[in-house]
Amino acid sequence: MTSSAPAAKPNAPVNVKLLLIGNSSVGKSSLLLRFSDEQWLPEDESSATIGVDFRVHKMDIKGKKVKLSIWDTAGQERFRTITSSYYRGAQGVILVYDVSNRETFDALPRWFSELETYVSDAVVRIVVGNKVDKEFSRQVTFTEGQQFATRMNCLFVEASAKTAVGVRDAFQEVVSKILDTPELWQPVTSGNKTGIAGAGKSAAAATMQSNQTMPGSVNLHEGAEEESAGGCMC
C-alpha cells in the first residue's frame, strides 16, 4: 500500500535534479554557467566537458523554495558509459542543440531514445536551441525546433548563453512544470521505503545498471549536497 509521506517542513526547499544533455560543443556548460553564475566563457577559451560537471542553484518559484542540482554531461560518445548512471533520480532534462549546426539538431532523436531507456515518462523535458546570437549562420529555424518539440511532447525555448536571452526562461519552464507534477517531487512511502514515484530511470534500466559496474565510472551521488563549480565550460 502506498501512502503520502509525512509533510515536509514548511520552509524546506524542494530538491530538484536537472540534466543537461546534447552533442558536444552545443553550449550546455555555457548555459549552465550563464544561469548559475551569470557569466559567459568565450568559445575560444572553453574546452569540452570531461565526464560530468555539477552545480547547485537555489531559486524561488511559484511560492516555493527550490534547490536545483544541475548535472552537465559530456556529449562525446566515449563518455557515455560514464554518464549513463547520471540519469538516476532526474526530474527534468534539458536537451540542447546548436541552431547554427544542423547536425546537432538531427542528433536529438538519438538523445530522446536514450531518455526512453533511462528515465520515466513523467520526467519533464525541454528542447533548447542555443546560440541564437549566431542568427546569420543559423541552420535550424525556430519553427523546426518548435515543431520537433511538439512532436516529442516537450517544452521548447531558443536561447543564447552569450547574450543570456532565453536562458533563465529555459530553466524556469522546466522547474515550473516539475512543480506542477507532484509525483516528481513529493515523497511517497511504500512499506518501509520512501522515494519519489515519478522520477528517475525506468525499472528495467535501473535493474540493469544496479547489476553491473562500469569501468571508469564515477559515483555521481557522493557529495551531491555540496555546492560544486568544477569542470570545464563548453
Image (cartoon, rainbow, N blue to C red):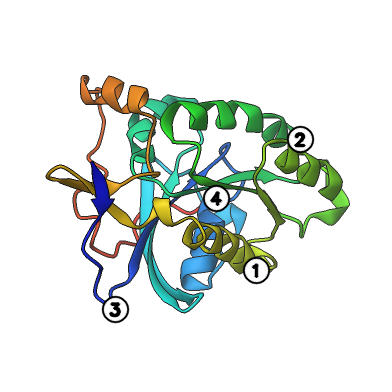
Q: Circle 2 is placed at which residue position?
A: 102
Q: Residues within 10 Å of mark 4 (few under 14, many from 20)?
A: many
**Viewer-nearest of discs 1 and 3:** 3
Residue 128 point in image, percent of width and height: 66, 50
Residue tagged 4? 28
What is the distance, in whole Å, between disc 2 and disc 4 at their CAs? Answer: 16 Å
Residue type, mark 4 in image: Lys
Query: Distance between the Cα atoms at labels 1 and 3?
Result: 33 Å
| Mark earlier in primary sequence (2, 4) | 4
Sequence order check, earlier mark of 1 and 3:
3
- At label 1, the amino acid type is Ala
The answer to which quarter of the image holds residue 187 is bottom left
Residue 37 or residue 173, whichever sits in front: 173
**Residue 198 appears in which quarter of the rendering?**
top left
Q: Is residue 90 visible?
A: yes
In primary-sequence order, the first of circles 4 and 3 is: 3
Taking the image as drawn, is residue 221 in sight?
no
CB atoms at circles 4 and 3 under 8 Å apart?
A: no
Q: Residue at x 23, y 63 (%)?
A: 226
Secondary structure under the numbered disc 3 in the rendered image: loop
Compared to 67, does 17 lie above or below? Answer: above
